[in-house]
Image (cartoon, helix red, strand yellow):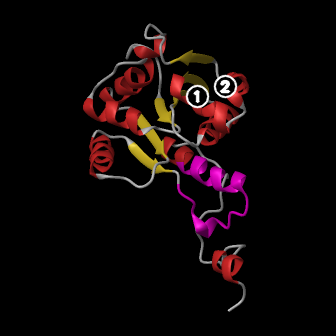
Amino acid sequence: MRVLLVVSGASGLVVGLRLAEALSAAGAELHTVVTPEALLVADYECMGRRGFVEALRRFSKNLYLSTELDAPVASSSHPIDAGAAAPASMRLVASLAQGIHSDLASRALGSLLRSRKRVVLIFREAPLGPVELRNLYRLAEMGAVIVPAVIGLYSGAETLREAVDFVVGKALDALGIENKLYRRWSREAPPRDPCRAFYGQS
């Protein structure tokens, strides 16, 4: 499976990096696009831009900057099976929703949407106003799968890694890739009761 991964400039770059790792481990051929804003965010929260790019390169067949408008993945003739944006900034979401493809990130994902290929958008933004909600709804109407970066408390996550893996696992589910990254819902009590963790025994 050939997958386009866009990492744009929003908090939560660790989700994008973990998704790249999980896709690579699943045998996907990964073509990654990084925006300049993502590099700026990496300086604050994800190993610094140099370490972040080096980590992404380990999991990617090709890595492009979003300024490389002539990259092969910009064209619908390039054989890409599915795409994901992790994290998807509200700027990227707005560009895709309005059909404004001014950089490689929006152009490549827009091409997949036009071709009716599977596109998963993981956003981490709060609160959401009417504009953001309308843009996300419009993308859902266009066929994108919207995956908010939220914690499933039934998974019993205790660490940041487990919380990230829940989101990444949901994205892999949406891409049709089997995974065991998170504890799925069952009638059994979760291994960790969040209320008791906060408030103790009742």
For label 2, the residue is 49
Residue 40, numbered label: 1
Which secondary structure is most common in the magenta stretch?
helix
Q: Say above or below: 121 vs 194.
A: above
Q: Say above or below: 83 vs 149.
A: above
Work out whether mark 1 precedes mark 2 in sequence or the reverse, and give the earlier one: 1
Question: What residue range appears in magenta?
Answer: 150-170
Q: Residues within 10 Å of mark 2 (few under 14, many from 20)?
A: some
Residue 115 rendering spot, x and y as whole percentages: 33, 26
Q: For this rendering, which residue is in front, 154 or 51?
A: 51
- Name the side, left or right, on which 30 lies relative to 174: right
Q: Say above or below: 160 vs 117.
A: below
- Name the side, left or right, on which 154 lies relative to 142: right
SS category of the residue bearing label 1: helix
Type of amino acid under label 1: Leu
Image quarter of the C terminus: bottom right
Type of amino acid under label 2: Arg
Q: Is residue 167 magenta?
A: yes
